[in-house]
Image (cartoon, coloured by chain):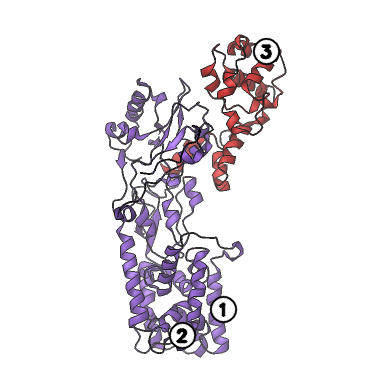
Chain colours: A purple, B red
Amino acid sequence: MSEPAKKQDNIITLDDLRPRQKERSYLADYVMPARHPNILFDPRKCIGCGTCEMVCSKRNRSVIAPASSSIKVLRDEAKGKNFAIYCQHCRKPLCIEACPTRAIEKDENGIVSINKLFCVECGLCTLACPESAPLRDSKTGEINKCDLCGGDPLCVKHCPEKALTLTRGKFFRWIKFARWTVQAASFLLLVMIFVGTFCFFKAGQVSFACPTGMLQNIAASKTIVLATLSATLALIVLTILLGRVFCGWICPFGFVLDVVGTLIPKKIGWPKFLKSRLTKYGVLGGAVGASAVLGFQSFCVVCPIGALCRSYGAQGFVKGAGVAVVPLLASTEIAQRRAWCRYFCPVGAVLALLTKLGLLKIVIGATNCKKFSCTQCAEVCPMGIIDRDLLRQGISPKIPMSECIMCMRCIDRCPYGAAKLRFRWQKGVPGIPGETRI
Amino acid sequence: MESTEQAVDRVKREAGIYACVECGRCSAVCPMAEMYTTFSVAMSPRGVIKKAIMGDDLIHDVNLWYCTECNAGTDVCPQGVSCRDLVRGLREIAVKNGLGDKAQICPRCGERFVAVPVEEFVLSRLAAEAPDVHELLKVCPACRRDLYVTRNA
């Protein structure tokens, strides 16, 4: 366990209080996520009895007085809805930054607590919290905030309807391992074993062809060959059934980008004027148009996916001179994760158009979602389509499936099981009828 | 109906400022010293109490609006003077006299819930957050809880 930064002359700095990480000493610390305790609340089960408030105030002030509890049940008699407001123990707590007396601290177990010795009850934490979870006792003026009772909360124990539950999050993230295996295997298959099978113009006995290449071919030759259509059908059907799994799980260039991105975790940021996801449709249009004019598949010459597929083997570097674009475009990974896929890839553009017919969607936000306090899904999303600012405001973001590459990092990472895979026609998030946003 | 002068007098008496011995403990523990780079004697609770005793016009004073209305000064005062009650009462009178432009108004419920400099301090500490989040933080705590519930219930 790491010691807090050395205190000089008993002065506590903000860095002493900010979330500290446990020192990683075992392999398991790298593989397994840190599992901090947290309380989950299910509004459907809550009957608004206020037992949680009572037991909490008993612990806080040794009296049964809901005013001095650290959990507040808001009751809506007209709609018959109840909701509990309590501290979510944010990963990056805003209250720590705002507290002028540095009384709030997040410890190694992830518990954010107020040090009553330093607290002067100014209430700035209440102003800084997006949920206003630190509650002011109307009788004594004290600020009460949940400290999880040191890891064994009384409110959870006493909740008669089990609306409050204690969780430590997911134990094992297996999707990560599955995806890396599939990506590595398909890289080997597409690049080294079936050399050049992915692309259109190496299609000798194709089972699998690039739809962008097909479009360019049609534009260039102005004839439609039925065999090529059927060859692209595999990818089209796959995309309609499962979304852009090709981009997330199969694409060899995507694998290269992911590897480079893992090796370079620090990003320098992408220039703002190039931040348009519509660019890739323009690239697609340009590629098809140029093919029609020039009479050959112009984009395929510089296509990084094709270059990779053609690069291996006897004729490798000679035929795949375009292989130079691979490191060139992989270097964009320094600026932003999957920048090529986000803004430029015309193959992804075709698949993005196909997902408009897709059957699957990813939904985030249910009773389980911790919104502003967690935002891990927004952090891990390689395409950057999960809006962190919306989560910060307590709103569940809608995920545009045409931009989603189905890598399922969000589903894998979410400790509380709030990110889920659903069919397109299923309304909202399971558990909540209709939309999550009322 | 009491006049403004009477109300100010009542607030001063109820806060017990005439018992002040000017020890300065309230200023020593005041979180404003940590919050504002412009912290001065005039802004400190000791200065404000002194001004109140001398009968200065505090209602029109900007220094009235930096206090967080915390409990620190009241807690340590050996004479039981409540600088919080003084500031709170004077602010109420100032708002009644139409001088409430230094009080933050909640855009949702329209209530004055915090002084503008205090809110500005909180937002400056959270400068890394997006503008949308700042908009949310300008809503009063009760409304914020309400908003969170309507978005998640």
Q: Is residue A296 above or below residue A244?
A: below
Would residue B102 be visible to someone looking at this image? yes
Label 3 – label 2 distance at C-alpha: 88 Å
Residue topped by disc 1: A286
- In the image, residue A310 lies at what x, y percent? 42, 84
Residue topped by disc 3: B53
Q: Which chain carries label 1?
A: A
Instruction: Say whether residue B18 is left or right of residue A263.
Output: right
Would residue A424 be visible to someone looking at this image? no
Q: In this view, does A393 lie above or below B95?
A: below
Residue topped by disc 2: A320
The quarter in which the C terminus of chain A is drawn is: top left
Q: Mark 2 lies on which chain?
A: A
Q: What amino acid is labelled 1 in the image?
A: Gly
Name the residue: 48% across, 46% down. A392
Q: Which of the 4 image quadrants contains residue B96? A: top right
